[in-house]
Amino acid sequence: SGFPSVLRNGLSKLGISNEILDFLFKWAVDLDKDYPKIPEAKGKINAIRSEPFFIPLYELYLTYGGIFRLTFGPKSFLIVSDPSIAKHILRDNSKAYSKGILAEILEFVMGKGLIPADGELWRVRRRAIVPSLHQKYVAAMISLFGEATDRLCKKLDAAAFYGEDVEMESLFSRLTLDIIGKAVFNYDFDSLTNDTGIVEAVYTVLREAEDRSVAPIPIWEIPIWKDISPKQKKVAAALKLINDTLDDLIAICKRMVDEEDPQFHEEYMNEQDPSILHFLLASGDDVSSKQLRDDLMTMLIAGHETSAAVLTWTFYLLSKEPIVMSKLQNEVDCVLGDRFPTIEDMKKLKYTTRVINESLRLYPQPPVLIRRSLEGDMLGKYPIERGEDIFISIWNLHRSPNLWDDADKFIPDRWPLDGLNPNETNQNFCYLPFGGGPRKCVGDMFASFEAVVAVSMLVRRFNFQVALGAPPVGMTTGATIHTTEGLKMTVTQRTRPPIMPKLEKTTFEVDESTSGPEGE
Ligand code: HEM
């Protein structure tokens, strides 16, 4: 590390305040003169407004490389698209970074929940929450995924029957909301069937979080604005409704736990209510109800839009690659037939899993990770100061022509079916759909299985095509990548596909629209 940075960190550890250090080290930049300077790209604000911001960042990456600085007037950001620098920030020196701007933007909805939290609070909450997502819990969730997907299938049956096109993005959003509500705090949003006030409130808050994350000026921080802006009033009312609902759910769950025989152990799970909330309360998690609410809200949001986006882009990709689709359907016909998936099937649905892996490569959710340096550090050969805002572009890593063959192509078997499931460790931080290091997603297994269950059940029953005359599927972004105008699809029932035992060679009726080349 650069000498001034090392010195500064040493002094900081001796308890000298940051204000004094900032004053003393103003000259340190000059001492760092021997070090190379981070390449600087001049920001073109206009370019950044008209398309999702990670697209111009990709263009700049191709010009300036794995780390560069982007400056807008007084603000500047470091854009990182280099696997070894990403590994350094996320894993090897993760304690030197906080969530920075992200925590500031999400404060109004997540408070000090697990995603924005930093330091000791984060450590304590992470230690409390991670055990709740144990093996037995995830296995129990498989049937929840199946039941929820089955409700979606019934809706699609009707659409297929009447020949009505469906907008899949909003249906996936409802599917994953129903799932995460039950999974996290045992609440049935039932949003696939009903539009209740609470469902609308969740969407109001989500849209606001996304608006704030792309807004140039934080007008919601202006004191009077909060009270007179109709939009802000609506947001406040929505937040109150959700918070009150969460408080009720916490109270109900507390009563259940009090009446239980307290037999808490590592894989504890209440069969009637396997939710994360129930686990936390039964574990005697010593936490304020505000903090508990913040954590529940964080998981609601973290597990909802991300999963919905994965399903949306997976079906979009499948609609463009009929050969992949028929291989996928072939596997599902062999492994599942019309059964609901079980935890054992997760190991067998190898190609389905690769389809999800590859969809997450092409459409990572979120497309960038946000950090702020808490102390001086070295990023590659460059020294950086405390207080740098950093965007790690997962989009760039996942689509880099230097790291991938045919980077823009949807090729699920780029990872051998019998090999390891790709993750940040075995792909050396070139592939990090769930982040990496100590702040890696706690719901990675949950989310992967959720997507595998939903995709397998849907493609078993239906064929999907982008609807004729549908608007082109463009990208827009908040926290996750959305479509600009939805994903309008024509859904048709597959003519009852046979259940095919894997090794038996029989002749069988081929579904007309899936008569691509043979599967494996
Ligand atoms: C963190 C992705 C589903 C809960 C993260 C991070 C990523 C991610 C990339 C790291 C963020 C960062 O380092 O700044 C995804 C994707 C999902 C998904 C792509 C779906 C396909 C879920 C689900 C849950 C969840 C279902 C809850 C059950 C969390 C939490 C964190 C997190 C609590 C913060 C962890 C911490 O900071 O210690 N997720 N996630 N995620 N995710 Fe997920």
Image: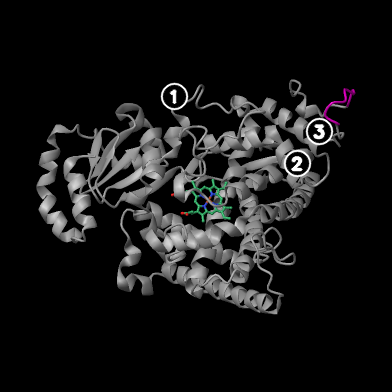
Residue bearing the label numbered 1: 401
Q: What residue type is labelled 3?
A: Cys
Residue type, numbered disc 2:
Asp
Residue 503 is one of the magenta-drawn residues: yes
Report the Cα–Cα distance between label 1 and label 3: 35 Å
Quadrant where the C terminus lies?
Answer: top right
Q: What element carries label 3?
A: helix
Q: Is residue 142 visible?
A: yes
Q: Residue 379 carries which label?
A: none
Identity of the residue drawn at 49% across and 25% down:
404
Q: Where on the picture, by quarter, is residue 251?
A: bottom right
Where disc 2 sits, the SS reads helix
> Does the stretch in magenta take in 341?
no
How far apart marks 1 and 2 lie (CA) works out to: 34 Å
35 left or right, relative to 412:
left
Q: In this view, does 237 lie above or below 30?
A: below
The one nearer the camera, 412 or 190, is: 412
- Which residue lies under the disc numbered 2? 345
In the image, residue 281 above or below residue 334: below
Distance, label 2 to label 3, CA atoms, is 11 Å
Q: Is mark 1 on a helix, strand or loop?
A: loop
Q: What residue type is labelled 1?
A: Pro
Side (left or right) of 188 relative to 120: right
Q: Which colour scheme is used?
A: one colour
Decide if residue 265 is on the left or right side of residue 1. right
Query: Is 211 positioned to the left or the right of 242 in the image?
Result: left
Q: Which mark is residue 334?
A: 3
Q: Position of residue 282 (x, y in %)?
A: 63, 70
**From what the image shows, is residue 245 above or below residue 347?**
below
Identity of the residue drawn at 85% across and 31% down: 500
The residue lying toward the viewer, choosing from 317 and 474, is 317
Q: Specify the segment rendered in magenta.
A: 501-508
